[in-house]
Amino acid sequence: MEPSAAKYKILHEVGRGNYGVVYEAVQNATQALVAVKRVSCRAPEYVELALQEFWALQSVQSQHNHVVRLEECILQCGREFQPLQRGLRKPDNQLLLIESCFKGRVCLPPRTACYLWFVMEFCDGGTMNDYILARSLDRMLNKRFMEQLASAMSFLHSNQIVHRDLKPDNILVCNSPRGPMLKVADFGLSKLCLGKVNVNQHRFTSACGSDFYMAPEMWEGSYTAKADIFALGIIFWAMVERITFRDASSQKELLGTYICRGKSLIPVGEALLENPNLQLHIPLKNKKSVPEEVCSLLRNMLASNPKERPDAFLLELRIEELSYGEKHQRCGA
């Protein structure tokens, strides 16, 4: 491989995004499969995304079943490989990397190959998007996935981590003897709130994320962790009704809800920003397809006013209490 040939061996590429390439690899000592993401450090914006991901995942003291596990992060400069550290005493190359992030220009030696390698647990089920779309509707699987994601979000928010880019392509699936397990991944746009702050009160000002999953307040550039709850609402709604759209650039079919305006698809958050009193028609397709208790929860999660949305901790409790149709509750007219 490249990060330390004695430690890992790359098998093949499994995907690539805007700022990194992901490989399936094997740890030579144990023969365990791992996922390795390589990020170039030649662009300051890529360095910033990589460091945000590293700081978020390294800040978690205990591991959660539904958050992707970071094994280690390795900094490569030329032929030198060093584990990335969060301590006060950092190697010179690591200090240059951080300086590049904050100064907005590359401070590393010229013409030197420089990469960050993220070594993470390997998820053999692909993305949540592909997993869901390859299967028929399954109420119990829907509830299971809702429970898992709510639990992950409660864990992250309790650790002062706001994801800011939740979408089905950023959630991975691991097959296990107990069934599929979701893993929240891709923390490049996440924010770690330092100190003992309430993430539901701490305000962010940089607009970021993926259009179809962004809360209305994110479009304005003033939002809290409640934006993550809105994104989950979009994901849950799309999952329980199999609502999809086709991505303009990749032409890939993606799970996501939207507002139709003529031939245009408008993100729900953008539509709510224009008209906070807009009534969302949940369910969208079939009144018998989703229990009323689920419809009510989705309406709360997608409230235009973030103060009216449940926080991650209340959301987890509400999902645990769902009967999900066992009492034959149906959506009303």
Image (cartoon, helix red, strand yellow):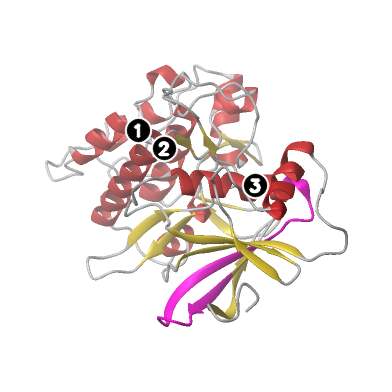
Q: CA distance from mark 2 to mark 3?
A: 25 Å
The residue at 28%/29% (across/down) is 314
Tell which of 326 and 310 is nearer to you: 310
The magenta-colored residue range is 23-45
Answer yes or no: do the residues labelled 2 and 3 have beta carbons within 8 Å? no
Q: Could you say whether the residue bearing mark 3 is in a helix, strand or loop?
A: helix
Which dot marks residue 49?
Answer: 3
Inspect the magenta stretch and tell me whether residue 136 lies in it. no
Q: Could you say whether the residue bearing mark 1 is in a helix, strand or loop?
A: helix
Q: Is residue 160 above or below residue 95?
A: above
Sequence-first disc among 1 and 3: 3
Q: Quadrant of the C terminus?
A: top left
Q: CA distance from mark 1 to mark 2?
A: 12 Å
Q: Could you say whether the residue bearing mark 2 is in a helix, strand or loop?
A: helix
The residue at 28%/46% (across/down) is 147
Residue furthest right in the image: 110
Q: Report the residue marked by disc 1.
A: 312
**Label 2 crowding class (10 Å Cα cut-off): few <14, some 14-19, many 20+?**
many
The image quadrant that residue 81 belongs to is bottom right
**Amino acid type, residue under disc 1 in the picture:** Ala
* Residue 127: image location, x then y, percent: 47, 61
* Residue 66: image location, x then y, percent: 35, 53
Answer yes or no: do the residues labelled 1 and 2 have beta carbons within 8 Å? no
Q: CA distance from mark 1 to mark 3?
A: 24 Å
Sequence-first disc among 1 and 2: 2
